[in-house]
Amino acid sequence: MTDTPRAPFTVQKVFLETAFEQRFQGILRHAWQNRSWHVIAAAPGSGKSLGIQDLVIRSGAQKNIQGISYLPVLAIRAPKNTAREQALGMAFSAAFGAIPSMVWHARRIWLAAVMAKVQVECIIIDDAQDLTLSQLAFLKELTDNLAAPPHGRQVGLCLVAAHSGNVVPFKETFANPEILWRQFRRRMDTERPYCVVLGQTEEEVRHILTTCEEIYRPQLPHLQLDRWTKPIFTWLTHSVLDPDATGRVTMDHLMRLLTSALRRAYEQGTSDVDAACLEAVAELMILRRDEVTQIDEILSAPPPPTQEVG
């Protein structure tokens, strides 16, 4: 009698409303409700993109039985490797489905009209650190046209950016004396124009680990992750993974450590993860992160896809 083969380990793709996401979505919702303008920065891998996606899903966007669309939160990703303002216009156009063929000066007018028609209340631009000066100027023009007659629609604006160190994106740009930037700065929120959303504290990491215990117990029945909170937090705030010495943990690093360690434990046939397994993965992430692996064999199974947290 042969043993039934064990099913492959499955990475659970679940959006977790972590403390970071509550902080991050809190300022996004503030901008939406108050039509305020903000620059919102966080470390790469914090979970910004997933938080934006979750907010859009829960924003109430719909098309009613009369075929009228309602899109209160319009979220796009900043175009890459181009300084042209048209690229930002095309990114906005793509959010409405099929991109109509028209010359650029007509598209500028069409964008303001279609945004007003679907009742856009807040614009969120992810990876905003990639925006160029000409694209920022077009963004101001677009929002000005929305606010002016015949639309009369004030919208919130969130420029969501990855940052490192003490440099907050756009702060120096908007401080320039030119009229354009003085006008842009005047539209920024009075109390919180520039926001840096911090990562997970040790206690917040503990809550995430407790949640992950429940998520992965069907595969590892005796899983107890919260007991490893202290060493996990220490590893993930190492200078290699926390180069700005924030003393906080990003969701990307935490989930990479967890899923790799849980997969190893599962493939070893255990029902829990131990310190040696966690430490081995932490060593790969910290001490051996730039190590080159020479592949001279066929892998038994393809690895699961990795989704980077933005």
Image: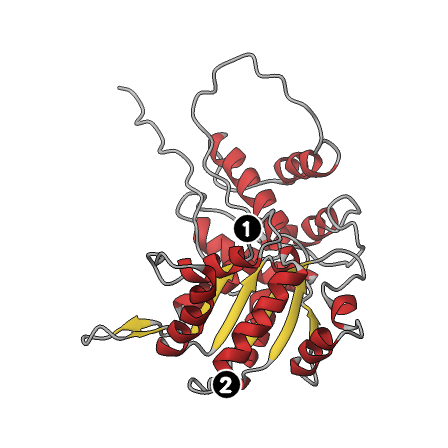
Residue 148 disc label? 2
Where does the image place residue 27, in percent across and percent down from the top left? 59, 75
Q: Can residue 78 be seen in this view?
A: yes
Left or right, 228 with reference to 164: left
Q: Can residue 200 be seen in this view?
A: no
Which corner quadrant of the image does residue 210 belong to? bottom right
Which residue is at 75% across, 67% downward?
173
From the image, state whether disc 1 or disc 2 is nearer to you: 2
State the residue position of label 1. Answer: 224
Describe the element under mark 2 as helix, strand or loop: loop
Describe the element under mark 1 as helix, strand or loop: loop
Foreground pick, 159 / 19: 159
Which corner quadrant of the image does residue 258 belong to? top right
Left or right, 33 with reference to 117: right
Query: In the rendered image of this protein, does residue 293 appear above or below residue 85?
Result: above
Which residue type carries mark 2?
Ala
Q: Residues within 10 Å of mark 1 (few under 14, many from 20)?
A: some
Where does the image place residue 121, in percent across and percent down from the top left? 46, 79
Which residue type carries mark 1?
Gln
Where does the image place residue 174, in percent across and percent down from the top left? 74, 71
Which residue is at 69% across, 74% downward?
180
Query: In this view, which residue lies farthest toward the top?
Result: 296
Which residue is at 33% across, 56% downward?
98
Residue 61 disc label? none
